[in-house]
Structure formats: structure tokens, C-alpha cells
Amino acid sequence: MTEQYDGQNAEQDDGQNAGRYDGQDDGQNAGRYDGQDDGQNAGRYDGQDAGENGGRYVLDLREIDESQAGRTGGKAAHLGALSRIEGVRVPAGFVVTTDAFRRVMAETPSVDGLLGRLAEADPRDREAIAALSARIRRAVEEAPVPAEIETAITRALTASGERAAYAVRSSATAEDLPTASFAGQQDTYLNVVGARSVVEHVRRCWASLFTERAVTYRRRNGIDDRAVRMAVVVQRMVVPWSAGVLFTADPVTGNRRVATVDAGFGLGRPWSPVW
């Protein structure tokens, strides 16, 4: 993970196939994600069931459990489950739900056409995939954030401590799956301060769903780009003695009988200071 203290750059823990599972023992359709648990209209960015129709744009992590992964993404769902375990200290925070992402996507019509062209692109044409992915990211990064979503985020920050530093973390619905971890495929930003900056980095996390790396990984695992939603976790930063990742399968070989811990001092990098 390449966490930057100024919030300008994302985690890049994308080592060679880190966290990938080969899925050979998982049946005929191992590693596939069809979005069927993401609501009646999975695979469509039509804004239905979004915040204006009874959904919520922000949920406290303590309100979440693993049954809500379709609205909160895999990372947030697991954090919510951890927060319910006695003795496990999960930094306080909230999640900007997939309702917000769906609304922004529905109000950015150029994305749908670009996704159609991406779906038709030759998987071997990396140049075309890179160019289309970049155009989609740019469209999402430039899309206005609706006032209702910005207000919901600002209120949550006010309740948590507006002047505190936060980690703004991607939490996609096709993430932390049994057969595809998506480790490091989307972005995370650290030490983000202030409501305006948090909103901007939430938008960057939405856009990171369409990095060339993430698009290629989805194709390799049989996952439709339109079937995936992005939620974003916003958590208070902590001062760690050490940090890292526990892989419940060997990140290189996919061997599920091996657990690997990759950690370092401070925020998890050798050069990170210990405060």
C-alpha cells in the first residue's frame, strides 16, 4: 500500500496478482459476480432505488453488517461486522453507500455510452481499454456531486469531528469475494482533512472503479463492469505502531491452506514514521 500523507495519491498495493484466488475448487462459475444481490435493477445505472426513493446516502459503520454488501461494498460490510465483535476496535466512521454512486452515474449519461464501447472492445486491445477507462474516470471525476449527497457527507463529518483526519477508502460491491479479492484495484486516500476535500476524494474513489487495472481484473474474473457499484468508507485516522494485510490465501499461488501477513511499521510501509 502506498499511502500518502497529503491525500493526493492512492494505495497501490497491486502486487503481482495479490490476493487473487484461482477458484478452481469453486464450481463451474467460480470467480463470477453477476450483481444479483445488488437489488432488482443490478447492472443498470438508472438511479432507481437511490436516495431519493427511500435509500440512504450515508450509513454509520455500526449500522452495517455483511448482509448489506450490495449497498456498502465488501470492505464496509466486513468493517461493520468487525465493529460488532467485542474487543475489536474499529476506527469510527461511515460509508457513502452505492445509492450515491448510482445517482451520480445516472446523472452522468456519457458514462453509459463509454461503458458500452468498453464492453465491445477487444480484450486484447490494451490501448483501447486504457483510453476508454481513462475517459470514464475523467467523466466521473468531473461529475457534480448532488447537494443532497454532499450535505449527508458533511453532516456525518460534523458528527464525527470535522477537523479530524480521515481515510477515504473504496468499497466496491465486487470486492473481497471468495474467488476474487480485488486487492488494491481501487483507490484509498489517507489523512484527508475537511469536508470539501473528503467529498472530492469520495468522487475520486468512485472514478477508481474504472482504472485500467480494475477493468482488466474484472474481465479476467468474468465480472460485468455495469454490475459493479462503488461505496466509499470514511474512517477516522489512527496512529498505528504497525499496519498491514492478512491474506487468507497465499497471494502468489492462491493456496488457501496458507495465511500470509504483510505488515510494516507505522502505516504499513518501511518508510512510514512511528508516531
Image (spheres, rainbow, N blue to C red):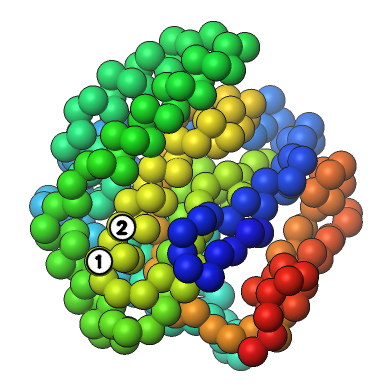
Horizontal side of 151 relative to 68 (left or right) equals: left
* Residue 200: assigned label: 2
Q: How far apart are marks 2 and 1 (CA)?
A: 6 Å
User: In front here: 250 or 33?
Assistant: 250
Horizontal side of 88 relative to 110 (left or right) equals: right
Disc 2 marks which amino acid?
Glu
**Are discs 2 and 1 less than 8 Å apart at CB?**
yes
Residue drawn at point x = 29 percent, y = 47 percent: 101
* Residue 61: assigned label: none
Residue 243 placed where, x, y %?
69, 74
User: In front here: 86 or 97?
Assistant: 97
* Residue 196: assigned label: 1
Residue 67 placed where, x, y %?
44, 59
Residue drawn at point x = 46 percent, y = 59 percent: 8
Residue 62 placed where, x, y %?
40, 78
Q: Quadrant of the N terminus?
A: bottom right
- SS at mark 2? helix
Horizontal side of 106 relative to 24 (left or right) equals: left
Q: Categorize mark 1 by other alpha carbons within 10 Å: few (<14), some (14-19), many (20+).
A: few
- SS at mark 1? helix
Tally of numbered discs: 2
Q: In the rendered view, tell whether residue 27 sits above or below residue 103.
A: above
Disc 1 marks which amino acid?
Arg
Residue 265 placed where, x, y %?
75, 78
User: In front here: 273 or 246?
Assistant: 273
Q: Quadrant of the C terminus?
A: bottom right
Task: Kindly indicate the quadrant of the structure image that contains residue 110.
Answer: top left
Residue drawn at point x = 64 percent, y = 42 percent: 180
Q: Is residue 147 visible?
A: yes
Q: Categorize mark 2 by other alpha carbons within 10 Å: few (<14), some (14-19), many (20+).
A: some
Q: In the rendered view, tell whether residue 124 sits above or below residue 141.
A: above
Residue drawn at point x = 37 percent, y = 58 percent: 201
